[in-house]
Amino acid sequence: MTLNRKITLLLITVACGILAIFMLISLYAFRHLSIASSTGHVQTAAEIVRVLLTESMINGVIAKREQSLERLRDIRDLRTVRVVRSKWVNEQFGQGLAREMVADEIETNVLDNGRPQFALREEDGQPVFRGTIPYVASSRGTPNCLQCHQVAEGTVLGAVTIELSLTELRRQALYGALAVLVAVSLISLFAILGARRLMLPVGDTAAAIGSLVQAALRGDFKGRVQQRTKDDIGDIAAHTNKLLSFLDEGLSQISERVAQLTGRPPQHDDNQLLATIDMIDGLADATRFKATIEEDETKTEIYERFGLLLGRRFGVEAYSIYEAHGATQLAPISVDGEISGSCHWCDPQILVRSEMCRAKRSGHPVDGLVQPGICFAFRAEGGNAEPDPWRHYCLPLIQSGTVGCIVQLVARESEAAARLGQIPYIQVYLREMAPVLEAKRLTETLRDSSLRDAMTDLNNRRFLEQYVDTLIASSRRRNSPLALLMIDLDYFKMVNDSYGHDVGDSVLKGLADVLKQSVRTSDILVRFGGEEFLIVLQDADGDNALMVAEKIRARVADFKFRIAGGMLQKTVSIGVAVFPDDSETFWQTLKYADVALYRAKDDGRNRVVRFTPDMWGDETVVY
Ligand SMILES: Nc1nc2c(ncn2[C@@H]2O[C@H](COP(=O)(O)OP(=O)(O)OP(=O)(O)O)[C@@H](O)[C@H]2O)c(=O)[nH]1
């Protein structure tokens, strides 16, 4: 129920109460007043009758007393005037008129006790007031009662009964009360209407503020309250409008700034407040994400964490993360939650011809959710024949001015709109991730360069020192031996001396290429010293190692090194030792391989020598 209605009801109730009380008081006052005034009238009339009777006695016309009384009865509203005589009068003057005999109990009582009696009664629906007044003998005045009556002073001589009709009085009183009732009713009505009119702006303002609050809860702060009056209510409306403007402007600024940060323009159907809170939540979360990945050790860990985030926060299960390697290659880093997974959602050709990837080529997002088929490299099982085909959205991540990696989000067509709504938020994470990835990439490159030989692009001795613990642990875990091949070019000094150092360098590079092609990718190639190379063969025993070493020796011997003005053929000597067969320690095994190498040199070069314990301590060994 509205406040206005409540107040109206209250005023009506109060008015009805006042009217009821007023009516009761009026009726009571009327009764009281009419009794009081009638009593007075009766007493006056009784006095008149007494004077009339006294005068009649003095003038000797007492016998005609009835005519005088008859004239009194003609007075309006005077219904009865009757005189009764006491026994004392009858004893002195004999029986009076028949009318003067005692008529009822009241008159008897009055004659007996000398006290007047008054009563109001209804007769045929009409109010009648009756008074019976005693005439008591008195010696006061002249003439007085005792001059004629031979009785003691104070004796009741008779009584007069007078009845007055109060019908007219009641009518007048009722008319009066009715007039007041109408007047009070009208005043109450005007008071109620006035109060309603005064309360109307209160109710309207309250209702308007109520609906504005509802709108505000839906994120709409644009509404305003109409300022109807220039009083307290008007002030409330003005203050509410000021507050709404403040909130509206503040929120618009916040959401605009947040939108600039997230890249997501405010949507008209959004709850502005909830959308802003959501965006701020997203930004805070992205900042936390950045703080976390900054402490991750490798890029792979970061990509893995990002993949988890895609799944947990955005419900993205189908996705690919590709990393650009060089100008033309892409490597799948994380695919559908699998680290270093295979190329699932794209033509694998993009891995070797990265320009086929539209996002890599253009450096811009590729929206296959809105424009299916925009990138020809996208591949999905079933294609467009599926009832709910797969779509993609690819986001390139720019690092140092070029595309460093590409995040590909894949969704069913039915989920495209929802996924599109998430993309600005995902981009916030990518923006936070880009500099961290860049820093990690630089660190890795730096570390990589300090662990690699720049000329041959093989690992260097430092790499071996850092990696050896992992290598040993892995060998022990798998209970699998490591074969060490120490390789040295024969008479390399002559190359330098005869053709110069540049030719010497190119021979070393050529040898590195031959070695790379001769072993598996799991094997480790190290440029150990100037023209000395080490190969660590994983899972190879002595026989296997000898076979590989022999293969390498033969290949090098057959290989023709291109030099300015012709070809050059060189040979290598190879020493072979096996960890842990030959020694419990890796570095001791390495020394044994070196010992075997020198034995190969000693034995004439261009040969493979397997270490045997008798070689250790041999005087011919120069280490
Ligand atoms: N061009 C070039 N030469 C190098 C490099 N590192 C080492 N050398 C040279 O390789 C030669 C190694 O010679 P030696 O150790 O005497 O042995 P060798 O001539 O190969 O003869 P044997 O090993 O006994 O068969 C030296 O002349 C070094 O200067 C390099 O990076 N580039």
Image (cartoon, rainbow, N blue to C red):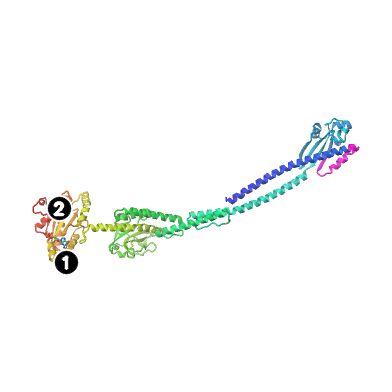
Whether residue 123 is visible: no
Whether residue 147 is visible: yes
User: Does the stretch in magenta take in 75?
Assistant: yes
Q: Which residues are magenta?
A: 56-81
- Which mark, residue 562? 1
Picture quadrant where residue 147 is located? top right
Location of the C terminus (image quadrant): bottom left
Per the picture, the main secondary structure of the magenta-coloured stretch is helix
> Type of residue at label 2?
Lys
Q: Nearer the viewer, residue 459 or 513?
A: 459
Q: Secondary structure at mark 2?
A: helix
- Which mark, residue 591? 2
Q: Is 60 displayed left or right of 365 in the figure?
A: right
Name the spot of residue 261 as percent of width and height, x first: 40, 59
Picture quadrant where residue 501 is located? bottom left
User: Does the stretch in magenta take in 148?
Assistant: no
Name the spot of residue 151 as percent of width and height, x first: 86, 30
Q: Nearer the viewer, residue 618 or 305?
A: 618
Q: Nearer the viewer, residue 208 or 550?
A: 208
* Outermost residue toward the front in this view: 141
- Which mark, residue 315? none
Q: Find ligand 1 in the image and state its quadrant.
A: bottom left
Give the spatial CA distance, label 1 vs label 2: 33 Å
* Residue depicted at 84% across the width and 40% down the height: 48
